Image (spheres, helix red, strand yellow):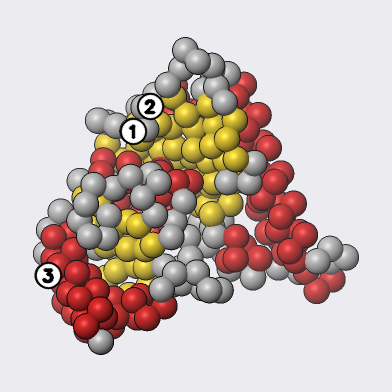
Amino acid sequence: MASRSAVINVMIRAADKASRGLKRDFGEVENLQVSRKGPADFVSAADLRAEEILRQELHRARPDYALLMEESGAHPGQPTSDRRWIVDPLDGTTNFLHGLPHFAVSIALTEREQVIAAVVYDPIKEDLFYAEKGVGAYLNDRRIRVSGRSRLDGSLLATGIPFKGRGDENHFLEELDHAMRHTAGVRRWGTASLDLAYVAAGRYEGFWERDLSPWDVAAGILLVREAGGYVTGIDGSPVRLEGRSILAANDRVHARLVELLSVARASGAAA
């Protein structure tokens, strides 16, 4: 079994405790037709309950640290600390609401805006991904690495599709068209934290998406890097937590994906 640090154990305990309620609520979501609650109210309550559990557990363990949480926003820490938790209590809310068993709790710890520890937990599949800077990435205590595939035509990618007026649909369709024509396939599961974890575990060769928030990607960034992969903006620029776009891939196809998506953007601009 891999040796876990104290901070990783804190994160895992918090994720596990919050996930118990999510699993219970997920069972109710699957039977909403007999529930007296509306689906939107139900899933909002599930989000908020999970987030409050995470806030309490993380604050109890490390009261000096600041927090950034999807639902309740920023919670200041002590001036003497430069560490901050970044938390998504339920990544994949739409999947959760529709009874699709693909969602996760995501927790990252940053120090001076650099991610130093990460946990992504899928409570339905019981997949626990975690990483610590300089220590490696793990899935259920087994060391993981990005895939070794080097050819785009053998690569499986993941992405996020713009929805409900968000993002540039035409721009995305150009990228998707190029990706479909040059790779083994593209998947869209709607949970960015797990997409990044799957790149780290070698299940996907790459993942790209725009219009994301820090809590969507913070933990996944470290997972991919500690598994030997590269993470940048879609144009290949250094990735930032507030950067809104991300491209993660194994070390062999990352540069080719930057080029492929660049060609797609140029093609769309010329159209």
Residue lying at 37% horizontally and 68% vertically, measured from the top left: 159
Question: Can you name the residue that lies furthest to the top here?
Answer: 80
Question: How many angstroms separate mark 1 from mark 3 (CA)?
Answer: 31 Å
Residue 244 point in image, percent of width and height: 39, 54
Specify the quadrant that holds the N terminus.
Answer: top left
- In the picture, measured across the screen, residue 262 lies left or right of residue 188, that is left
First in sequence: mark 1 vs mark 3: 1
Q: Is residue 217 above or below residue 172?
A: above
Q: Categorize mark 1 by other alpha carbons within 10 Å: few (<14), some (14-19), many (20+).
A: some
Q: Amino acid at mark 3?
A: Arg
Q: Label 3 neighbourhood size at 10 Å, few (<14), some (14-19), many (20+)? A: some
Q: Amino acid at mark 1?
A: Gln
Which amino acid does the dot numbered 2 rest on?
Glu
Q: Secondary structure at mark 2?
A: strand
Q: Nearer the viewer, mark 3 or mark 2?
A: 2
The residue wearing badge 1 is: 114
Q: CA distance from mark 2 to mark 1?
A: 5 Å
Q: Is residue 152 left or right of residue 208?
A: left
Q: Residue at x 25, y 52 (%)?
A: 232
> Which residue is rendered at x = 43% and y = 60% of the image?
211
| Residue 116 visible in image | yes
Q: Residue 111: which numbered mark, if any?
A: 2
Residue 61 coordinates in the image, percent (x, y): 57, 21
Query: Residue at label 3?
Result: 151
- Residue 263 at x, y percent in the picture: 17, 74
